[in-house]
Amino acid sequence: MPSRFRREEIRFAWFLILPSFLFIALIIFYPTIFSFVLSLFQVDLTRRAQGTPFVGFRNYAEILRSSYFWSSMGRTAYFTVVSIVLEMVLGFFIALLLNQKFRGRGILRSLLLLPWALPITVDAIMWKWIFNANYGALNALLTQTGILPAYRPWLTQGWSAMHCVIVADVWKVTPLVALLLLAGLQTIPRELYEAALVDGAGRIASLFTITVPLLLPTATVVLVLRTLDAFRVFDIVYIMTQGGPANATKVISFLAYQEAFKFLHFSKGAALSYIITMVVALFAYLYTKSMRRQIEY
Amino acid sequence: MKRTTFLNKLVIAVFSILLALVILAPPLWLFISSIADLKELLAIPLRWIPENPNFARYSGILFSSGPESEFRTIMANSLYVAFFVTVICVFLGSLAAYAFSRLRFPGKDKVLFVLLFSYMLPPIAFIIPLYQTFSRLGMLDTRGALIVTYSAILVPFVIWMMRTYFDTIPRDLEDAARIDGCTYLGTLFRVIFPLSLPGVVATLLFAFLMSWEEFFMALILTSTPQAKTIPVAIAEFSGRHSIDFGMMATGGILAALPPVFIAFVFQKYIVGGLLSGAVKG
C-alpha cells in the first residue's frame, strides 16, 4: 500500500473537484447554514416595523408547542405510512407477477415506465381531473355503472381528499417500486426453489422462507428512498388540494411553504424547514443503521 | 398438474390485463380529454369517446400567436433550462467523477460523503435564503436562477452515477493510453468517456428529466412567462376558477411527451440507471 500520495496527482484531483465543490457550497451549503441563522431571528415581512430581532429558539418553541404543527405531522405520517404500505405490497405482487414467464411480459414491464416517466405535476392534474366533483371520470364511471347514485365531491370532502392524494402517489410510484423489487427477485437463484420443491415445500412455504427473506435487503433500500420522499410530499398536494379542505391534506412541506412564501414569515418557515430536515436526517440515519445490521446478520 | 398450470396461466392473464388497464386508463383519459370538444367533456352523462376528435388545441399551442402561445414560450423555457443544466452537470460532474474514480488523494471519501449529503438535503432546507439572495441580485424570475440552482442540486448525483460507470472500465486501457503519451484529461476524453457512453447517456437523461419536471423550486423562483417552466404553468392552469379542462389536458400531454418518449426509447439505459439505486423516485 503506497503511503505517500503523489503531489501532482493530488493537485490535479482538486483541480477537477474544486469547481463542483465550490458551486455546491455556494448554492446549497451556504443557504442551508444561513437558513438556520435565519430561524434564530424574527424576519417577518408582515411585521417589518418590529425590525429583525434575535429571538434564539423561540420560533422552534412556538412551532413545537402549536397544535397545527402536530396535526400536520400526523397527516404527513398518515400519508407516508398508507402510501408506502400500498406501494410496497402492490409493488411486491406486481414484481412476483413479472417474475413469471409468460407472453407479453416484456411489454408489461415497459409499460411500468409510463407512470414513472410522467412528470409528477401531470400525474397531479390528471387525477385532479379524474376526481373532479362535477365532470370527473370517476364520478361518471361510478354512476354509469350504478355503483353510486350521484356525483361526489371527492377532493373537497375531508375524509376522501387525503385518499385521493394517496391514489395519485400510489399510481405514480408503485411501478417503480415493482421494477426495483423485480430486480431483487431476479438475483435469487432458481436452484433454491428447486431444492425446496424437492424437499416437498409448497409454493406458499417457499414464498415465505425463500423469496421474502432474500428480498428483504432490496425492500429495505426501497423503503428508505420512499420514506424520505413521501415524508416530503408537496407537488401533488399543492396541485390537487392546496392543503384543503379545511387543512385535511396540509402536510408538513406545504405548511412550511405557506409560512415562508404565502404569509412571508421567513424565520418561522426556516425553523419549520429545519425541523423537517432533521426528521429526514433521522430517518436516513435509522435506516442506514438497520441496513448495516441486516448485512451483518 | 395440467390443471394447475392452466389455472396459473389464467391468474397471470387476469392480473396482467388488470395491471395494464390500471396503468393505461388514466393517461388515456387525459389524452382523450385533450382532443375532445369541451361540450362533450362537460356532458352528463359523460361521453367517453369523442364524436369529432381534433388536435386544434395542440396546433393552437404550438403554432398560433394567440393567448395559447404563452404555453409555447413556457415550453421553450423548460427546454432551455433543462438543456443548460444537463450541459453544466455533465461537464462539471464528469471531471469530478474522474478524480473520484481514478485519482488518489487524501480526504477522498469525506469529500464524496459531503457531496452526497448535499444531494440528500430537502430543497426546503436552503430555498428561503436562496430566494432572498436571488431577490437581492435581481435574479428572481429568470431562467438563470433555475439553471444555477438545478445544476448545483444535480451535480452530486451526476458525480455519483458517473463514478460508478467509470469504475467499471479497466485501468489497463488507460495505462496503455498513458504510456502512449496521453495526459490525464486525454485519457478521460479519449478512453473513459467513449467506453462509458451508455452510463454517460443515462446520467444525461436523468439530469434532463429531473430539471424538466422540477416543480417546487420553479414555483418559488419564477412567476412570469419569461422564466416559468411547464410544471408551474400546469399547476396554475389547474388552479384557475374557470378551468378549460381540455387545455389543461393538452398542456399535461405536451409536458409528458418528452419524458415518456425518452423513457421508452432509452428504456435499457433508464432501467439500468434506476437499478443502480442512486435515483430518487
Image (tube, grey):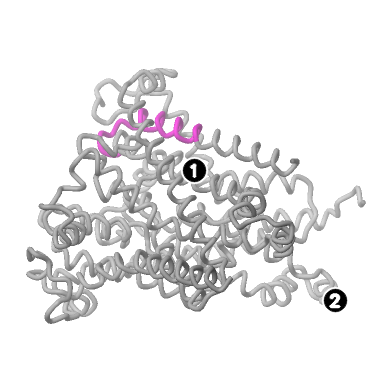
Is residue A44 placed above or below B105 in the rendered structure? Answer: above
What amino acid is found at the position of numbered circle 1 in the picture? Thr
What amino acid is found at the position of numbered circle 2 in the picture? Ala
Q: Secondary structure beneath disc 1? A: helix
Magenta stretch: helix, strand or loop mostly = helix
In the rendered image, the quadrant that contains the C terminus of chain A is: top right
Please name the residue that numbered disc 2 is placed on. B176
Please name the residue that numbered disc 1 is placed on. A227
The chain letter for the residue carrying disc 2 is B
Q: Secondary structure beneath disc 2? A: helix
- Magenta residues? A261-279
Looking at the rendered structure, whether the residues under marks 2 and 1 are on a common chain is answered as no
The chain letter for the residue carrying disc 1 is A
* Residue B159 appears in the figure: no
Write the residue at 11% across / 55% down.
A134
- Quadrant assignment, res B130: top left
Write the residue at 49% across / 43% down.
A227
Closer to viewer: mark 2 or mark 1: 1
x and y, in percent, of residue A130 in the image: 22, 59
